[in-house]
Image (cartoon, helix red, strand yellow):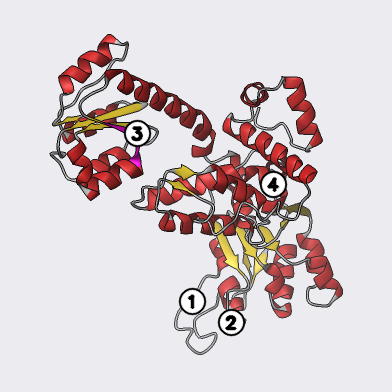
Amino acid sequence: MNLGGDGHAINDHLTNVGWSPTQVADLPAAQRIQAQKRFQVGLLITGTEPTVSDAALEACVKASRGTEWVAVCAPQALESSGFRDLVLGFFFIYQTLPLDCSALGWFLDHAEQRAMLRQRYYAPMHSVGALGMVGHGAAITHLRQQIRKVAMTAAPVLIGGESGSGKELAAQAIHRCSRRSAGPFVAVNCGAISPSLIHSELFGHERGAFTGASAQHSGLIEAANGGTIFLDEIGDLPLELQTNLLRFLQEKTINRVGAVRSLTVDVRVVAASHIDLAEAVLKGRFREDLYYRLNVLPIEVPPLRGRIEDVPELAEHFLRCCINEGSTRVDGFRRSAIAAMQAHHWPGNVRELHNRVRRAVVMADQRLIGSADLGLTAAEKTESLGLDAVRTVAERDAISLALARVGHNVTLAARELGVSRMTLYRLMDKHSIAQCGQ
């Protein structure tokens, strides 16, 4: 994109050394060509100062995701704080005039290599994994297998797992894989509804059933007719409501508050709880008969610390989501940030990771997020370990990162790590790293 520099001379040089440049002279032309074609490298040529606003340039550069940008400009252009921030935030490298053709060729070659690496690394991360779940580790792969199996039946499913681990995501996946996928999916947080209202919210009420009931109201179970109702934190359901829910599970009928007749509904129940319901039964806080009615097909969502190999991929997924939500110059993570995330214990699970990435997108001052932006320190996992243990952790993390970068292709990962395939298989077995995604 030539916005005031010696574009023709540069274009001729690039053509002579084997590049096939597409030259445009203004921003609208650049935007039109970007909509039609994807480029691995973008070159901005400008003189003393760009002929368009910094904000317009930033929007153009950000619209070309996956493109590595190089700037050629007059030294005076960098005296503008806006242009300087643009180059620091979004450009791979810059060169000042007068032009050094050999240096420019070197810059463009390395920008292309970086774009190719970015494409190979981010390609599996830009698309949400099967069933809407991100990750290729053994734990999440096993969960997907369970979901596909239970989805094909109409029996109730009980999902266990810590808060923030993704139980509702698993419930949505069950619904999408089931024969009811065309029907509604209704999610209810049983702990978030007032005990005095939950009966009416779940089962509905007739007009005049109680003070303020000025019209008939269909409950959430009725609203899920033909589909799935997800009862999250079902352990918080009052005991008297547990009796009504048990009757619904047994008879497939509900009674609105104030009604004299039962309604037949066709709804599959998927329930979840972060507490141990079997223990709640022993303590008298949950009905034993309801527990056995719900616990027909139990599945467990693993905590994030149990699938730590998926953390880089999840972080990249959340970063892409944050980038799509609004304006930001952040475009990736530093190695120190990846190491810090893999060293963290994640007591808040996937929800905590999402929130830390959102915070980092706001707080980061540079293009790549560092560990401090995430509120993490890379040393927290190894500071109390001996040298041998530190080496073990580093070896495992290097293997996990290499596999994530190449989409879990063992051959490519072995090439990156500089070892044979058989050596990599042995190391994967040593560190209990599953071969997934192939």
Amino acid type for the residue under numbered disc 3 = Ile
Counting from the top left corner in percent of width and height, residue 277 is at: 78, 67
Sequence-wise, the earlier of marks 3 and 1 is 3
Residue at image x 66%, y 67%?
A: 233
The residue pinned by badge 3 equals: 93
Q: CA distance from mark 3 to mark 2?
A: 71 Å
Q: Quadrant of residue 418?
A: top right
**Residue 349 drawn above or below residue 219:** above
Counting from the top left corner in percent of width and height, residue 239 is at: 74, 78
Magenta span of residues: 90-95
Sequence-wise, the earlier of marks 4 and 2 is 2
Mark 4 secondary-structure assignment: helix
Q: CA distance from mark 2 to mark 1?
A: 10 Å
Assign the N terminus to one quadrant of the image: top left
Q: Quadrant of residue 51?
A: top left
The residue pinned by badge 1 equals: 216
Q: CA distance from mark 3 to mark 1?
A: 66 Å
Sequence-wise, the earlier of marks 3 and 2 is 3
**Residue 32 drawn above or below residue 148:** above
